[in-house]
Amino acid sequence: MKKILALLGLTLCLSSTMSAQNTDSKGIFKHVGANVSVGTEGIGFGVATPVTNYLEIGFGLNFMPDYKVNSKVEVDDLKVSGLVVNGNKLPDQTIHMKEVDVNGSFARTTCDLKVNCYPFGGKSKFFVAAGFSFAGSQLITLQGHSEDVKDAILKYPQYKGQIKTEIDKYKVQFDDNGDINGDIRVSGFRPYLGLGFGRLVPNKRVGARLELGCHFQGKAKIYQGNQEIEPSDIKDKDDTFSKVLPYTTLYPVLKLSITGRIL
């Protein structure tokens, strides 16, 4: 995190130095642009203003559609022991649980503030970008239901809250109805670095822009009922969520924008 913030500061310092050494033909905040975009952040809308020929500031709002992913997830077997009926102790048994279908929803809204530096100034369109995005920390919502778990809890109510499924290194608990609800969270403040080609405030009335970069989201964690689940020492799982979770530290950005100059 310190390296990212240091790089952001360095970008701002370099941009300020270059702007001080060159005559700004555009004028500080004299022009304003608007843009629409599509990419891995969803559908975006933004506004921007050039500070100098070398420096540009943009603010954006991105809407990720409700993209869903489904995966079968393993459920821990239920070990029943110590049952006594009419004074007779029943033999211990293990109830095997079928895999459960878990649905993940990626819908979210994010805002971002970025500083774009055009190192060659003038009419050059190549840029490097630094900034951050901010939004709710929720990345993926998890939902599922198991009839096996529901029936087991009805038959053995003393095991309520003890039947769990495993996602990555986390044991996620079923409720009394056999439902599973949780969410995967990352940092709500996400530093950003990127580069690309095109200006948010084009030299002509309309332009196009391509941007590549990544958000630094921090380590993903699973929550239930607003409580963080502590990771367990369990073997790696093969479901989709377990495969994706370790790679959510970095969120890749590929964005294509249509830009326009308003002023």
Image (cartoon, rainbow, N blue to C red):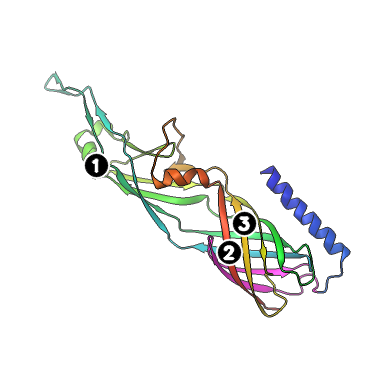
Q: Is residue 204 above or below residue 228?
A: below
What's the mark number on residue 255?
2
- Amino acid type of the residue tagged 2 in the rendering: Lys
Q: Is residue 5 above or below residue 234?
A: below
- Amino acid type of the residue tagged 3 in the rendering: Gly
Q: CA distance from mark 2 to mark 3?
A: 9 Å
Q: Residue at x 31, y 41 (%)?
A: 175
Q: Residue at x 62, y 66 (%)?
A: 210
**Label 2 element class:** strand
Q: Which residues are magenta?
A: 26-52
Q: Pinpoint residue 241: horizontal percent, then vertical percent.
A: 42, 46
Q: Residue furthest left?
A: 86
- Mark 1, residues whose alpha carbon is within 10 Å: few (<14), some, or many (≥20)? many
Q: Any magenta on residue 42? A: yes
Q: Earlier in the sequence, mark 2 or mark 1?
A: 1
What's the mark number on residue 150?
1
Q: Residue at x 28, y 43 (%)?
A: 178
Q: Pinpoint residue 61: horizontal percent, then vertical percent.
A: 57, 64
Q: Pinpoint residue 117: horizontal percent, then vertical percent.
A: 74, 61
Q: Earlier in the sequence, mark 3 or mark 1?
A: 1
- Mark 3, residues whose alpha carbon is within 10 Å: few (<14), some, or many (≥20)? some
**In front: 128, or 229?**
128
Q: CA distance from mark 2 to mark 1?
A: 44 Å
* CB within 8 Å, label 3 to label 1: no
